[in-house]
Image (spheres, rainbow, N blue to C red):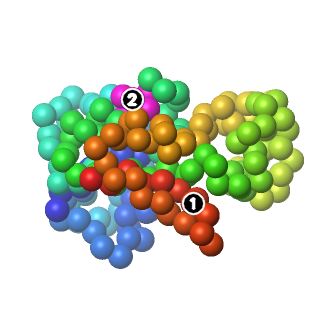
């Protein structure tokens, strides 16, 4: 299988129990793929295909928890367009907006708070992945926009929407086709 991973990392694929025959990881940051056979890292924006990938097709386009970070509706539409152009099959996962705990900060209901209050929580809450030390945390907080079921259906209208659940509560949505 030939797989395009939008926003992935070598670390995630090295830990994967099953690896594709050919893997292209498109990420805006250069990283290490390590000892992955048949893998290539392309540095670029998941919303704008680099010239080296123009005209390519993949068996599967995959993305795990990236679409909520790309920066607003226009960028999410652009990423969805890349997904649709690059392959007939995809698996696009994102945390669900209405799960009671915001997954990046591990704080209950944080996604529903005003931005200033989210920044205060992010600076003080000890369970978050990366606590900002100052008001620069505004940028960290504003880059995350969790998606609803309606938004995922809009971006991936021909996909099956799969719920990933914890104790009967949807924690993530997957657009699969």
Q: Which mark is residue 140?
A: none
Marker disc for residue 170: 1
Q: Position of residue 69 (x, y in %)?
A: 53, 38
Disc 1 packing (10 Å; few <14; some 14–19; many ≥20): some
The local crowd at label 2, few if under 14, some if 14 to 19, many if 20 or more residues have their Cα within 10 Å, is: some
Against 12, residue 107 (above or below) is above
Q: Nearer the viewer, mark 2 or mark 1?
A: 1
Q: Which residues are magenta?
A: 75-79
Distance in Å between CA atoms under marks 2 and 1: 23 Å
Which residue corresponds to mark 2?
77
Horizontal relation, residue 94 to residue 120: left or right: left
**Res. 93 visible in picture:** yes
128 or 37, nearer to the observer: 128
User: Which residue corresponds to the image point at 84% horizontal and 35% vertical from the top-left?
Assistant: 117
Q: Position of residue 21 (x, y in %)?
A: 18, 65
Q: Is residue 71 left or right of residue 141?
A: left
């Amino acid at each position: 299988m030939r797989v395009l991973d939008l926003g992935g990392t070598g670390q995630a694929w090295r830990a994967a129990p099953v690896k594709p025959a050919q893997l292209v990881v498109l990420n805006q940051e250069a990283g290490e793929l390590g000892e992955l056979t048949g893998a290539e890292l392309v540095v670029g924006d998941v919303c704008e295909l680099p010239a080296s990938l123009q005209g390519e097709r993949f068996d599967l386009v995959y993305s795990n928890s990236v679409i909520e970070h790309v920066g607003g509706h226009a960028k999410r539409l652009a990423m969805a367009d890349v997904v649709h152009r690059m392959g007939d099959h995809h698996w696009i996962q994102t945390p669900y907006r209405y799960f009671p705990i915001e997954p990046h900060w591990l704080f209950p209901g944080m996604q529903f708070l005003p931005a200033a209050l989210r920044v205060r929580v992010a600076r003080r809450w000890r369970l978050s992945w990366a606590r900002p030390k100052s008001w620069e945390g505004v940028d960290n907080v504003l880059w995350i926009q969790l998606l609803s079921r309606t938004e995922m259906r809009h971006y991936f209208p021909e996909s099956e929407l799969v719920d990933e659940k914890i104790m009967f509560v949807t924690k993530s949505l997957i657009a699969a086709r």
